[in-house]
Image (cartoon, grey):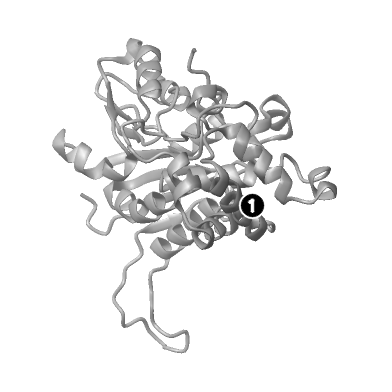
């Protein structure tokens, strides 16, 4: 199956990065290299591009798409949480721009055997990195009712989380839940029919919750963002596209904290905590897809782009 993924907010992201021809740019979620190709086109012979992805299929597809830029592009199979180590191992300590396009790719959703989609019956997998041993099946069959309820409530933001968790536990007592189709049917039985008629696909939120938990998506983002901002050179930018309200909240909060890290009580006349701003938030409000983009690519509907610009005191 060909790795197809329509890059969301492509022009807005490339514009937000403000690519310098001789700069060093990192895409931490390389995917099918849609954004990467546009960055590479703007680089001179002295510029460098580093693409990181944990999905082997993405690595293969991106390597083909970036073949024309092999003199300046380096592709690494890893998780973006190891970005600093991967770059240091290649002698890079500072970069001019970082890009993250979070969530699941069209390819991963459309490739049935990966088990990301509730639209076909497939093994419960959902691993973004297939070197990982734990799968979605381990969560569905192994987590207790309280843990299932927590992830479906918190990561799926589903108001029927308690009932869904109860139904999953009851069903697996009879036999292990092995496929996406089986799980989808269990979820359907847990949600009132009248709600199913209006609220989109009933399994969407639970599948999202299991995927986020399995791949530690929110933890990785939360633990990596400060370090990525630290890697930026003066006036370097980080552009992040999110597709989930919890991801967006993490990005918004961490960007604001890096802009204004002061922890002094509001009634203090002067700052005494000594925390210095690392830069400024460029997007007071997130950049959203245009009506045209949402029409052409329905998967872009929940996308939000936020941009932060680094300002170094040391001007290295």
**Left or right: 127 as drawn, with respect to 297:** left
| Image position of 254 with respect to 214: above or below | below
Q: Position of residue 257 (x, y in %)?
A: 42, 65
Residue 285 appears in the figure: no
SS state under label 1: helix
Front-most of residues 4 and 165:
165
| Image position of 142 with respect to 154: above or below | above
Q: Position of residue 209 (x, y in %)?
A: 54, 48
Q: Position of residue 101 (x, y in %)?
A: 47, 37
Image quadrant where residue 272 sits: bottom left
Image quadrant where residue 74 sits: top left
How many numbered callouts?
1
Q: Which residue is mark 1?
A: 167
Front-most of residues 226 and 299:
299
Residue at 72% across / 29% down in the picture? 292
Residue at 29% across / 34% down in the picture? 78
Q: Residues within 10 Å of mark 1 (few under 14, many from 20)?
A: some
Residue 128 appears in the figure: yes
Residue at 33% across / 40% down in the picture? 80
Front-most of residues 102 and 307:
102
**Left or right: 212 as drawn, with respect to 66:** right
**Left or right: 42 as drawn, with respect to 121:** left
Q: Residue furthest front?
A: 174
Q: Position of residue 62 (x, y in %)?
A: 38, 19
């Amino acid at each position: 199956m060909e790795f197809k993924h329509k890059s969301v907010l492509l022009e807005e992201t490339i514009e937000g990065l403000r690519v310098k021809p001789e700069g060093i740019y990192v895409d931490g979620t390389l995917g099918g290299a849609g954004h990467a190709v546009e960055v590479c086109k703007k680089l001179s012979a002295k510029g460098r591009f580093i693409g990181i992805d944990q999905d082997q299929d993405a690595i293969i597809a991106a390597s083909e798409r970036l073949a024309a830029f092999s003199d300046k592009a380096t592709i690494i199979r890893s998780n973006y949480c190891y970005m600093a180590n991967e770059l240091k191992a290649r002698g890079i300590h500072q970069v001019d721009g970082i890009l993250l396009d979070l969530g699941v790719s069209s390819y991963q959703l459309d490739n049935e055997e990966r088990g990301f989609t509730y639209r076909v019956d497939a093994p419960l997998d959902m691993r973004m990195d297939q070197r990982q041993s734990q799968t979605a099946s381990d969560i569905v069959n192994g987590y207790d009712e309280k843990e299932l309820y927590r992830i479906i409530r918190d990561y799926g933001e589903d108001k029927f989380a308690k009932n869904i968790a109860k139904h999953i536990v009851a069903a697996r007592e009879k036999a292990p839940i092995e496929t996406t189709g089986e799980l989808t049917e269990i979820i359907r039985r847990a949600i009132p029919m009248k709600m199913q008629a209006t609220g989109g696909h009933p399994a969407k939120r639970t599948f999202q919750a299991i995927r986020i938990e399995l791949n530690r998506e929110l933890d990785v983002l939360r633990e990596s963002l400060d370090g990525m901002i630290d890697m930026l050179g003066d006036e370097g930018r980080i552009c992040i596209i999110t597709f989930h309200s919890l991801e967006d909240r993490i990005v918004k909060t961490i960007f604001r904290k890096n802009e204004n890290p002061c922890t002094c009580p509001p009634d203090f006349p002067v700052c005494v905590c000594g925390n210095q701003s690392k830069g400024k938030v460029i997007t007071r409000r997130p950049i959203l897809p245009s009506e045209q983009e949402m029409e052409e690519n329905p998967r872009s509907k929940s996308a939000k782009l936020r941009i932060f610009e680094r300002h170094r005191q040391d001007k290295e």
